[in-house]
Image (cartoon, rainbow, N blue to C red):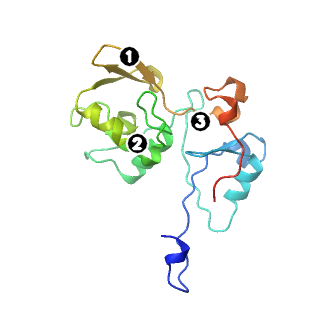
Amino acid sequence: SNASTLSPGVPAPPAVVRIVVPFEVVAGLSEAACELPGHGWVTAAHARQIMTAPGSVWQRLAVEVDSGRALELSTDRYAPTREMVDHVRAVDGVCRAPGCQTPAERCELDHIVPWPRGETRVSNFEALSRGCHNPKTAGAWTVEQVDDGGIRWITLGGRDYITYPKDWRDALRDPSTTREPPDSRSCDLPPF
């Protein structure tokens, strides 16, 4: 709800803002750009300002240094835990279907290897927009996991594409060496 619909004297609910901040930026050892998933990039100084604002809550995402991939979580149930959902959305960043850029926060989670044959663990999930999830479930795509966190998508016509999870080391690299075009890595202030 927005502030205009709240009763007088009732505080607005806190905003949830996810921001990706490398440890080196937190420690003041780097001025690398930081990411607001689904929005873009902010300066290290602005990221530290957001992090230190009253009421800020930190959620750590452990990442392998060599690969940039987030570490594993699992459960014996069909449905992922809330922590797993948050984890997969953070790892993927956007829908994992080829060409789809729907922010992962607006995606459903899908077992890559269908349950119960495929375990309920973060490495067996992908974030898919509803528009991509339904055709995949209907058999329009065949998917399989490949090395280094990739997912191979094969169309009914035999074309194949490979998508990868977000590489959390991107903020530490020179923008000219990342997979995203430099002009999409804006340091504009977020819309809040």
Task: For mark 1, give the secondary structure.
Answer: strand
- Mark 1: which amino acid? Asp
- The residue that mark 1 highlights is 160
| Residue with the most extreme front position | 4
- Mark 3: which amino acid? Trp
Residue 17, by quadrant, is bottom right
- The residue that mark 2 highlights is 73
Query: Position of 67 compared to 32: left or right?
Result: left
Task: For mark 2, give the secondary structure.
Answer: loop
Counting other residues with Cα less than 10 Å from the Cα at mark 1, is it few (<14), some (14-19), or many (20 or more)? some
- The residue that mark 3 highlights is 168
Q: Depth-wise, is mark 1 or mark 3 nearer the camera? A: 1
x, y (%) of residue 108?
36, 44
Query: Position of 181 compared to 134: left or right?
Result: right
Asked if the residues shown at circle 1 and circle 3 are in contact, with their CB atoms under 8 angstroms apart, the answer is no
- Mark 2: which amino acid? Leu
Asked if the residues shown at circle 2 and circle 1 are in contact, with their CB atoms under 8 angstroms apart, the answer is no
Residue 29 versus residue 147 in the image, above or below: below
Residue 191 versus residue 100 in the image, above or below: below
Counting other residues with Cα less than 10 Å from the Cα at mark 2, is it few (<14), some (14-19), or many (20 or more)? some
Residue 170 versus residue 155 in the image, above or below: below
3 or 2: tag closer to the N-terminus: 2
